[in-house]
Each structure stands twice: as structure tokens, then as C-alpha cells.
């Protein structure tokens, strides 16, 4: 089995991405989780980022613009994209 990387696109959310990250960390195949932040300004989100940035499997990428508009920059980071607006069931 090959390790996988995961991208989570986020803007000003805490509950959903926190639960998703906790679930994903339990998957054995996961090598790295990239959280792409779309220039959030919600303090609970920013505080959560500070808490998780030290985890060796998590990298927070803070964009100065919407990552949905510039997603092509991230294509080389992932084998699986998880987006709460899409059905992205992992098998």
C-alpha cells in the first residue's frame, strides 16, 4: 500500500475540520494532512491552527486568496481531496 496525502480546504470553520483531522489521523495509510486555509479571520480557527501546527503529519498552508480559485497550485500535494461539500468517501 502506498501512503496518501490529504488536502482539507477550509475557511473559518473549526468543528468540521477538527473532527475530520481526528478521524484521518487514525487512518494508517495517511502520510500527511494539508489544511489549506483560505485566509480565515475567525479567531477559534486561527487558535486551532496554532494547536495543530506542531503535529508531524499536519501542515497548515495559509493562502492570501481563495484556494478554490488557485487549486491548481496544490495538485502535486495529494492523492485524495476531502471537501465537505462533496461526497468524498474513502475506501
Image: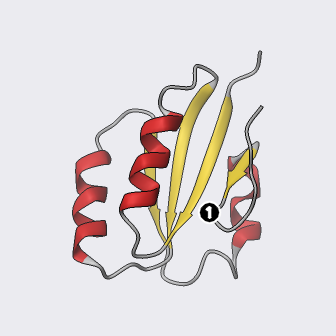
Of 24 and 77, the residue lying toward us: 24
Read off the residue under disc 1.
84
**Residue 10's x, y, as percent?**
50, 68
Q: Is residue 52 above or below residue 24?
A: below
**Residue 15's x, y, as percent?**
37, 59
Q: Residue at x 47, y 31 (%)?
A: 25
Q: Residue at x 64, y 39 (%)?
A: 5
Of 44 and 64, the residue lying toward us: 44
Q: Is 49 on the left-hand or right-hand side of 87?
A: left
Q: Is 26 on the left-hand or right-hand side of 81?
A: left
Q: Point out the image quarter for the C terminus.
A: top right
The number of discs equals 1
> In the picture, residue 41 is in which quadrant?
bottom left
Q: Is 42 on the left-hand or right-hand side of 40?
A: left
Q: Residue at x 69, y 77 (%)?
A: 70
> In the picture, residue 62 is in which quadrant?
bottom left
Residue neighbourhood size for the residue with mark 1, other residues' Cα within 10 Å, grouped as few (<14), some (14–19), many (≥20): few
**Residue 17's x, y, as percent?**
45, 56
Amino acid at each position: 500500500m502506498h501512503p496518501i496525502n490529504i488536502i482539507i480546504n477550509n475557511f473559518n470553520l473549526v468543528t468540521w475540520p477538527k473532527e475530520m483531522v481526528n478521524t484521518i489521523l487514525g487512518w494508517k495509510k495517511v502520510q500527511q494532512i494539508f489544511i489549506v486555509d483560505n485566509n480565515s479571520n475567525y479567531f477559534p480557527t486561527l487558535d486551532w491552527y496554532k494547536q495543530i501546527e506542531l503535529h508531524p503529519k499536519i501542515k497548515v498552508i495559509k493562502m492570501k486568496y481563495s484556494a478554490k480559485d488557485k487549486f491548481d497550485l496544490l495538485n502535486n500535494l495529494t492523492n485524495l481531496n476531502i471537501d465537505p461539500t462533496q461526497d468524498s468517501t474513502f475506501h
